[in-house]
Image (cartoon, grey):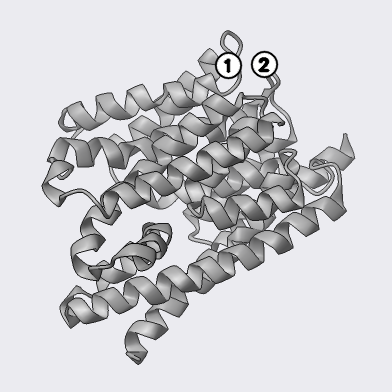
């Protein structure tokens, strides 16, 4: 075992996993049961997609708009898989497990180990992927049970904790002017559409802005 | 089957298929810079929209209530580079305090 890689994996997976508390609580506040919340973390295992699923359904959106929003957020895992596959060289069952563990953090730690060679990169992927999987699911259960005990989401401020958690998720990405302008435009567009279209639609509609800003990003620099 | 179960199963199946597809197709298929750029913009747009809807709406109407105060505190905490737990808990505490004062 490579101790330096292991230490980095643990330092990433524990705090990220602890964030599962926020997901478990958000999920129960949105109307999912404790069992359903745990299944989402075990099966979907991708933070942003999970928050989108419970966020859209919790605000009254249909299963279709919730799934579409969550799936758009999951497309980056596809890109991570492209990067990781040549490194891991897995087959059959191991490939299924590697795919399920392909998330922001496992890919991030693998890439950060580039200077230590492909073996350390693959180790970073596995340690972090397995570590986050264990902690994320454990803390989802704790958060879901906690929220179930609390009852009305507004009583303990869970109604504000959920958007605050989302904000914490995107904050590190708002590095440049393009990203910030996009965030404000998406916020305004979603609110402007809310009174006129079915719940969930205002959120997924902002994907159009992502495409426009992705294509024309240079205009803003 | 309830809508929640449909959302749960559909999201999980698609999430896995996207991941598995990434491990199965040649890298050059998706590595166009424009695709990568759009892909990095998607979470920013969708999650910002989610923040907006969860903070400012109830059903289909726009409202300003204790959640906005909670979110404002979260923004301050983020600017001060507070750890994630502090961001969430300070937002929750602010919102809960105002909710009980009303």
- Residue drawn at x 52%, y 50% is A44
**Which chain does tag 1 point to?**
A
In the rendered view, would you say A5 is above or below B41?
below
**Can residue B56 be seen?**
yes
Q: Dot 1, crowdedness within 10 Å: few (<14), some or many (≥20)?
A: many
Q: Nearer the viewer, residue A201 or A83?
A: A83
| Quadrant the C terminus of chain A occupies | top left
Q: Nearer the viewer, residue A131 or A22?
A: A131
Q: Residue furthest top?
A: A196
Name the image quarter holding residue A6: bottom left
Look at 36% across and 68% down and name the residue there: A94
Q: Residue at x 72, y 31 (%)?
A: B2
Callout 1: SS: loop
Q: Quadrant of the N terminus of chain A?
A: bottom left
Residues under labels 2 and 1: Cα distance?
6 Å
Answer left or right for A216 relative to A202: left
Please provide percent x and percent y for residue A23: 62, 52
Q: Which mark is residue B60?
A: 2
Percent of width and height locating residue B101? 88, 39
Residue A174 appears in the picture as rendered: no
Pointers 2 and 1 in contact (C-beta within 8 Å): yes
Mark 1 = which residue? A194
**The label number, if any, that marks residue B39 in the structure image:** none
């Amino acid at each position: 075992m490579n101790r330096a890689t292991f230490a980095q994996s643990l330092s990433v997976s524990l705090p990220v996993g602890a964030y599962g508390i926020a997901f478990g609580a958000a999920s129960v506040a949105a109307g999912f049961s404790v069992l359903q919340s745990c299944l989402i973390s075990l099966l979907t295992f991708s933070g942003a997609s999970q928050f989108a699923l419970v966020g859209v359904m919790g605000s009254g959106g249909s299963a279709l708009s919730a799934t579409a929003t969550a799936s758009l957020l999951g497309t980056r895992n596809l890109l991570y898989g492209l990067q990781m596959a040549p490194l891991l060289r897995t087959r059959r069952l191991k490939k299924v497990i590697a795919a399920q563990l392909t998330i922001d953090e496992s890919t991030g730690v693998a890439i950060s180990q580039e200077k230590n060679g492909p073996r350390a990169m693959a180790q970073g992927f596995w340690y972090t992927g397995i570590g986050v999987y264990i902690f994320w699911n454990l803390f989802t259960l704790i958060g879901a049970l906690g929220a179930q005990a609390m009852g009305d989401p507004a009583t303990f401020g869970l109604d504000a904790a959920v958007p605050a958690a989302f904000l914490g998720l995107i904050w590190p990405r708002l590095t440049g002017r393009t990203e910030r302008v996009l965030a404000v435009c998406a916020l305004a567009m979603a609110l402007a559409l809310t009174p006129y279209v079915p719940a969930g639609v205002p959120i997924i509609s902002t994907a159009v802005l992502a495409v426009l800003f992705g294509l024309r990003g240079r205009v803003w620099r | 089957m309830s809508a929640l179960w449909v959302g749960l199963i559909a999201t999980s199946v698609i999430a896995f298929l996207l991941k598995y597809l990434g491990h199965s197709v040649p890298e050059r298929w998706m590595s166009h810079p424009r695709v990568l750029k759009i892909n990095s913009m998607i979470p920013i747009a969708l999650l910002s929209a989610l923040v907006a809807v969860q903070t400012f709406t109830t059903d289909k109407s726009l409202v300003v209530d204790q959640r906005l105060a909670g979110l404002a505190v979260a923004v301050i905490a983020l600017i001060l580079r507070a750890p994630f737990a502090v961001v969430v808990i300070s937002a929750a505490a602010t919102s809960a305090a105002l909710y009980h004062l009303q």
